[in-house]
Amino acid sequence: MRNLAVVLSCLAFAATAFAKDDARVDALMQRYEGDVPGASLLVLKDGKPVVAKGYGLSDVEKHVPAAPSTDYRLASVSKQFTATAILLLAQDGKLSLGDTARKWLPELPPVAAPITIRQLLSHQGGLIDYEDIMPADTSVPLHDKDVLALLAKTDRLYFPAGSSYRYSNGGYAMLALIVERAAGMSFQAFLKQRIFEPLGMQHTLAFVNEGPAVPNRAFGYSEEGGHWARTDQSMTSSVLGDGGIYSNIEDLARWDAALYDNRLLSDASRKAAFTGWTATDDPTIRYGYGWRITGDTLWHSGETIGFRNVIVRYPKQHLTVVLLTNRNAPEPYKTALKVAALYL
């Protein structure tokens, strides 16, 4: 009965798809089709799902097909949720974006004293990449608190706070810890209580081994020697703030809708999130709070062992493309842009 309910839900969700566009979309998604790690694709136009479809397999060994209800590890697409959690707490008056990170995390080294929450959000903090300072023989997956412990022992920065840009996973791990201390609850509980449950995102969660299982879970794969090997987790996969959320395209449609109105964030908070506060390594891209800003688009990609994802929003055209994949290649951003071009 449960499988039937899932199928009916998927069919209802995709009921408005335009059949005339299926062939063009399928041609762009051909690499994901067949007995291989796959993808789920969502196209929203004027708030309605024009395409909501799975390709290939979410579990190669068990031959489970990918579907709109398949949950993928979002990787860095998670950062927009971490940023939203911070903005919600700012709206609540629990913290200020101008607060120093050390106000909430006094364990950070003295050299980090000037770094503000605002600078962590826009990757201007200069913190050392935790992947570069974690012990080579690490055998137990790191959590956000372990990232803090590593940074606490590293009294140096890449640059003075606010003077430059460097994409920082560690900065977003620190933001998750700030959420916990300001809210007085776990990061995953805050996300569930303040974002996922209010929006009806019933199958989205920040995944921890001791917590609820991921529903309809996709497992990650990497192509090795001409075959697909399961590469689902690494020693950094349990860090939540920079990339630990699992979700599906059905729930992300609800998330996208909330980014157009005040049901979560105020006009001022959304404007702040979608403002390009800092230049990046690419002269065509600026970074907001958990979002990259490129001309008419707001977007973010996510890459981790066995998963590559992207969400691209065209707010003026009221168009969004979400492409979630459980494989290490190809990079999905260009494919998402080609899909979007069919509907612009």
Image: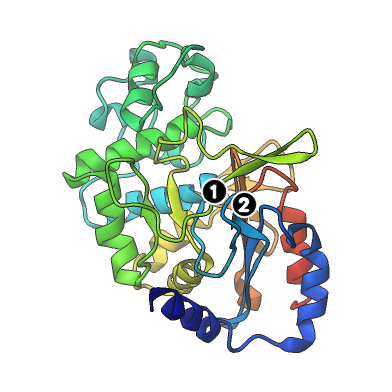
Q: Position of residue 66 (x, y in %)?
A: 59, 63
Q: Depth check: 258 or 214 in front?
A: 214
Q: Position of residue 60 (x, y in %)?
A: 62, 52
Q: In the rendered image of this protein, does residue 56 appear above or below residue 135?
A: below
**Could you say which disc has been placed on residue 60 in the image?**
2
Say how many tags the image has. Answer: 2
Identify residue type, mark 1: Phe
Q: Can residue 289 be seen at all in this image of the molecule?
A: no
Q: Where does the C terminus fall, quadrant-wise?
A: bottom right
Q: What residue do we see at 24% from left, 32% from top?
A: 104
Q: Can residue 167 be seen at all in this image of the molecule?
A: yes
Label 1–label 2 contact, CB within 8 A? yes
Q: In the rendered image of this protein, does residue 184 appear above or below residue 123?
A: below
Q: Residues within 10 Å of mark 1 (few under 14, many from 20)?
A: many
Q: What residue do we see at 47% from left, 81% from top?
A: 9
**Could you say which disc has been placed on residue 219 in the image?**
1
Q: Depth check: 94 or 173 in front?
A: 173
Q: Residue furthest left?
A: 184
Q: In the rendered image of this protein, does residue 75 appear above or below residue 238?
A: below
